[in-house]
Image: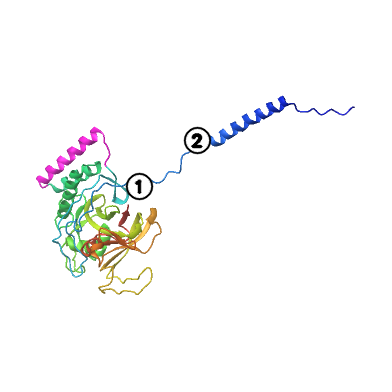
Amino acid sequence: MGRRRRRKNSPRRLWVIGSLMTVAGIWGYAQFISPVLEGEPEEEAPAVAMNTVDAPVGAAAAAPMLPPSNPGPRLTSTRPETPSPQVNERISEKGARDESPRQEVSPATAERRAKLLAAGRQALERNELVNARSYLSEAVTLGLSTDELIEARAALVRIGTETIFSANIFPEDPLVRQHMVSPGESLGKIAKKYEVTDDFLAAINNISDKNKIRAGQNLKVVQGPFHVRVDKRTYRMDVYLQDTFVRQYQVGLGANDSTPTGEWVVGTKLLNPTYYPPRGGPIIEAGDPENPLGEYWLELVGIGGAARNQQRYGIHGTIAPNSIGKSESLGCIRMHNEDVAEVFTLLVTKDSHVFVR
């Protein structure tokens, strides 16, 4: 068999091959690049709900509460109530509330919140405080205008002063009840049962010595726990009893956004803490006027969000009151000394949660 003759490529044949290769290349490139041209979805960043408060609250925005019974409870304060514009709130986990910018609502919702606000005003005029609290709390969760929110929250603070932070007992109040002391019961044991502090129970029952209660004695008790929500943008701390707003304070926060957001639980509570500088330096003993912690320390244990597993943070007083309402701490939450004394009385180790946003 003779050797097969090799065929030479003609110019026409080369043009056809080249055209086919060009078409194939263009098709492949289009397949590769088309997702980019159409815009592939980027990784979604977590949404952060910013609230729309115009200005931080005053340093003494809460109605009076009292420090631990050391040197004894006090029931009154000369600090004025200074309500601040707020945004609408909705109930969240652990009794705290999320706050988000007010959004358009359906006509039915708008009508309901108007009726709730009107009912709350009428109940206040009749001195029906528990009913007023219920109406106003629900109205706030549905969203109100800035002026309405100022009014509602100020009213809720005043109602809390009468219904929660006094010796008064309103029979229809679901947050409050009467407890008869059983033989062998201590104030601490009763407080643990209701998830509040014995200092708080001593205060609202005008007990000067926590070790002196007697069997058969009737005490006012409140079903806790209290929780806290801190808004970093407005330097505001809101206090809730379960899911009912009752107090607000102004705070100082960490410089350079160093106060982690997320969920915390209250850990060790200390009176007259010693200061151990986290970045080194001399230890400052309790009672020293240079101690930056003041007289109260509430440890924060991070359990959620950016706060998870975070340590060495806390809520405490300050020797620099001008830093309240600013970002000047090393990351802790600073409060005016009289305010942190009240919060110390309210929050319970392991039961009270702090939400920072």
Q: How many marks?
A: 2
Report which residue position mark 1 lands on.
Answer: 48
Question: Which label belongs to residue 217?
Answer: none
Residue occupying the far front of the picture: 11
Residue 255 horizontal/vertical position (percent): 33, 60
Report which residue position mark 2 lands on.
Answer: 37
Disc with the residue nearer the chain's start (1 vs 2)? 2
Rendered view: 349 above or below 100: below
Rendered view: 74 above or below 263: below
How would you rate the neighbour count of disc 1 (Cα within 10 Å): few for under 14, some for 14-19, many for 20 or more?
few
User: Which residues are the magenta region?
Assistant: 102-127
219 to the left or right of 44? left
Res 202 seen here: yes
Residue occupying the far left of the picture: 126
Residue occupying the far top of the picture: 12
Q: What residue do we see at 20% from left, 61% from top?
A: 201
Q: Amino acid at mark 1?
A: Val
